[in-house]
Amino acid sequence: MAWDWKKIGAVVFAFASLSVAALYGEAKNLVIYFIDVEGGQATLFVTPSGQSVLVDTGWPGDRDASRIATVAKDAGVSQIDDLLITHYHVDHVGGVPTLAEKIPIKNFFDHGDTVEHDADGQKLYDDYQKTAAKAGAAHHTIVTAGFKLPVKDLNWTIVTAAGKVIEHPLPGAGQANPDCSSFEKEDVDATENARSNGSIIEFGKLRIADLGDLTWNKEAELVCPANKVGRVDLFIVSHHGLDISNSPQLVHALHPRVAIMDNGATKGGTVKAWTTIHETPSVEDLWQLHFAVANGPQANSAADLIANPTENPDSAFYLKVVAHQDAHFEVTNQRNGFSKKY
């Protein structure tokens, strides 16, 4: 039998072209994984060009580091290109040393020195610094408010850092915030929470807010009397949904379409914060990493919007966002495959 090499070549070329087109189609998107670290934070961004940015690393020990490494592998990530530490609390920076043993971390970004110099706080900071030092000084950057994280495909602006907020509104922002007239200050927060690195992340027309564990009074500095950051499409709920963060003045100013809360079963997701977000008129859905046990069903989202609905330490389902430059995106629950477009 004679082989028609021209026809075979044409078929191979067509198949290869389709494969490349499919890969190119996937590569046009920003993919975000909200990893379950039991009420800490570990959020993995993978850009269209394949650059990886991890915000925080969860708690110390093998559990969270393994969960992050597993998700990174599933995402096709062989190293963490950029690690952004929001602040030096155990549920955010504790996992750094163990994670660095499991997957290479190239660049480290943080807000500088800690303000918590008790024995536990100092150890957390020192352990982190030792790990970052291994990458070399050229790969360790202290960020300030207004700093642009060097992420290809994204406009990533640090809007709060080390207790300071941006001096001038971001482009398109700066509108007066009518909710500020009812704002009431809380006690001054002298902890690392108030020094969180907070970010506004832009991908084409899509805008995302991640303010770490920024607390009540510092939130107000961002949005009162004028909203310096503008509206967003996706709000990564501050401070795991605790009510010393997530003021109505902040949430209403951000005007998000969707909120995602990295709470634990017994940490965060307070009734007050959940209600503020859930009742914000712009919010279509509030997704949760865990069912908040103390709240009961009346202050939890529908089951399909909760990655981990039971207190099962062996389950660690994540939420995944696939975002597009025209500002539409899909959120998928790994546990049951439920997906919704916005």
Image (cartoon, rainbow, N blue to C red):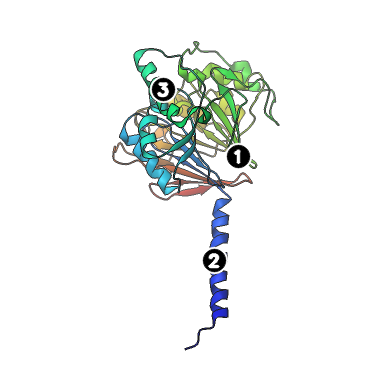
Q: Left or right: 41 with respect to 166? A: left
Viewer-proximal residue among 69 and 287: 69
Q: Earlier in the sequence, mark 1 or mark 2?
A: 2
Q: Secondary structure at mark 3?
A: loop
Alpha-carbon distance for marks 3 and 1? 27 Å
**Residue 292 left/right relative to 139:** left
Can residue 200 be seen in the rendering of this structure?
yes
| Mark sitting earlier along the chain (2/3) | 2
Q: Position of residue 57 (x, y in %)?
A: 41, 32
Q: Earlier in the sequence, mark 3 or mark 1?
A: 3
Q: Quadrant of the C terminus?
A: top right
Q: Is residue 340 above or below residue 106?
A: below
Q: Position of residue 230 (x, y in %)?
A: 65, 30
Which x, y percent locates residue 38? 36, 33
Q: For marks 2 and 3, give the CA distance.
A: 48 Å
Looking at this view, is 282 or 29 the one in front?
29
Look at the image and tell me whether residue 291 can be seen: no
Q: Residue placed at 43% from the left, 37% from the top?
A: 288
Q: Secondary structure at mark 1?
A: loop
Labels 2 and 3 touching (C-beta < 8 A): no
Mark 2 sits on what residue?
16
CB-based contact (under 8 Å), mark 3 and mark 1? no
Residue 322 vs residue 173: left or right? left
Residue 54: x %, y % from top left:
47, 36
Q: Amino acid at mark 3?
A: His
Q: Is residue 65 left or right of residue 81?
A: left
**Mark 3 sits on what residue?**
89
The quarter holding residue 119 reads top left
> Which amino acid is tagged 1?
Leu
To which residue does mark 1 refer?
A: 154
